Image: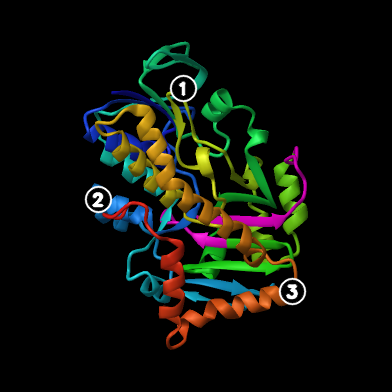
């Protein structure tokens, strides 16, 4: 089987690993000029953790994991007003969780894929045409590729989805928030943050800082917004929205670059993920948003599910089974993201106070067991032996 994967992110690399292992001929194209080291911090558990274990890469991921000791909610003066120790969080999930930068997870997956894998950077899909038993793909570098299957693993703003299914606006569901992030160098601020993920929140706005393994700090910003378009000057918007959240946040704002990451907080909702010999995986098919979390974990779970269904099966039938297995899990995570959005970035001060206190319950006797059951339910694996 010849498979063309568009996107060398977490979903694309995982799918390539499993397909190559089964003997498929796999080509990966990626619009970025080279491997990306950027991204955000995530709590990696659930189906992604299970898939990583099956791939034999857990030791490499443990070496890449960040040493974060707690999630700390702070007031404008930087005083801790709530939070959760990561030791408690880890205990909730029986130790099966890692704090990882997205770029570090991608690096481990690339290494696992090996030097023999064909990844063509600086290249994406320009056009798609169905042919009997396959698909013809024009590439942005002028090349052409015929495959038995084209997989769009190219994220929430997927080019493959647009070409095969229609404009993005028909599938993107903004949740009423904008988000931004960037890396910064500030030794004094890094010392104040320490090995913590520190969040300062007021109604409709939240700014977070955490350390990376490289010694740099990462800023993670989110605020409520009904704007349907993105600002022409993201940096100016960031400075206007987040200024005044206290000395720690203001100092981080002084390091905001001219081109920070900035986007809607959104989900992708589609009636179907496949059309002919084109299918989607990960955020391209079903982004759940950072409000729900586990997008990277779900990307790995979905890639594993798609790969296993393709083994020795008719392609169209395999795509149907892949979607039927994944869709209930995806819909549940998307509902969770919509339901919890107002508690992650509350609209009212009393909600912030209540949230901060609730997170601290895990550090009390019995709290770990109660919250652990809830987390395991939300992170139920689609890659379990019975799945």
Q: Residue furthest bottom?
A: 365
Q: Secondary structure at mark 3?
A: helix
The secondary structure type at the circle numbered 1 is loop
Q: In this view of the protein, which residue sits in the foreground, 316 or 156?
A: 316
Choose top left, top right, bottom left or bottom right for residue 349. Answer: bottom right
Q: Is residue 30 magenta?
A: no
Per the image, the residue denoted by label 1 is 123
- Whole-Å distance between the Cαs marked 3 and 2? 44 Å
Q: Earlier in the sequence, mark 3 or mark 2?
A: 2
> Quadrant of the image for the N terminus?
top left
Q: Which mark is residue 204?
A: none
Res 300 visible: yes
Q: Is residue 382 above or below residue 365?
A: above
Q: Position of residue 133 (x, y in %)?
A: 37, 16
Viewer-side residue, 37 vs 202: 202
Element carrying mark 2: helix
Q: Which residue is mark 2?
A: 54
Whether residue 222 is in magenta: the answer is yes
| Residue interval drawn in magenta | 209-232
Q: Is residue 81 visible?
A: no
Q: Specify whether 5 is left or right of 204.
A: left
Colour scheme in use: rainbow
Is residue 213 shown above or below 247? above
Mark before the other along the chain sequence, 1 or 2: 2
Q: Nearer the viewer, mark 1 or mark 2?
A: 2
Q: Position of residue 197 (x, y in %)?
A: 52, 66
> Which residue was labeled with disc 3?
349
Q: Residue at x 31, y 38 (%)?
A: 309
Q: Is residue 363 left or right of residue 237?
A: left
């Amino acid at each position: 089987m010849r498979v063309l994967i568009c996107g060398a992110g977490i979903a694309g690399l995982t799918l390539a690993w499993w397909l190559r292992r089964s003997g498929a001929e796999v080509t990966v194209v990626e619009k970025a000029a080279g491997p990306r080291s950027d991204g955000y911090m995530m709590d990696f558990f659930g189906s992604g953790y299970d898939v990583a274990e099956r791939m034999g890469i857990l030791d490499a991921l443990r070496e890449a994991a960040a040493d974060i000791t707690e999630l700390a909610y702070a007031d404008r003066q930087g005083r801790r007003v709530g939070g959760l120790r990561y030791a408690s969080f880890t205990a909730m999930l029986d130790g099966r969780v890692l704090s990882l930068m997205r770029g570090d997870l991608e690096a481990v997956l690339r290494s696992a894929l090996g030097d023999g894998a064909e990844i063509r950077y600086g290249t994406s899909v320009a056009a798609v045409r169905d042919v009997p038993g396959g698909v013809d793909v024009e590439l942005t570098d002028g090349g052409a590729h015929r495959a038995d299957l084209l997989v769009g693993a190219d994220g929430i703003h997927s080019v493959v989805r647009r070409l095969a299914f229609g404009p993005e606006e028909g599938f993107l569901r903004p949740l009423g928030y904008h988000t931004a992030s960037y890396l910064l160098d500030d030794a004094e601020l890094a010392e104040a943050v320490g090995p913590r993920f520190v969040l300062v929140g007021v109604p409709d706005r939240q700014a977070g800082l955490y350390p990376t393994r490289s010694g740099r700090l990462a800023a993670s910003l989110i605020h409520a917004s009904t704007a349907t378009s993105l600002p022409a000057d993201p940096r100016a918007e960031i400075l206007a929205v987040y200024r005044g959240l206290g000395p720690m946040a203001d100092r981080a704002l002084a390091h905001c670059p001219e081109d920070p990451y900035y986007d809607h907080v959104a989900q992708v909702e589609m009636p179907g993920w496949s059309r002919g010999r084109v299918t989607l995986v990960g955020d391209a098919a079903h982004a759940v948003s950072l409000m729900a979390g586990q997008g990277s974990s779900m990307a790995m779970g979905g890639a594993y599910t798609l790969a296993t269904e393709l083994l020795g099966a008719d392609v169209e039938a395999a795509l149907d089974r892949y979607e039927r297995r994944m869709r209930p899990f995806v819909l549940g995570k998307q509902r969770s993201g919509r339901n919890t959005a107002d508690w992650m970035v509350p609209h009212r001060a009393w909600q912030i106070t209540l949230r901060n206190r609730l997170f601290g319950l895990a550090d009390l006797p019995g709290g770990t067991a109660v919250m652990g059951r809830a987390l395991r339910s939300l992170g139920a694996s689609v890659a379990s032996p019975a799945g």
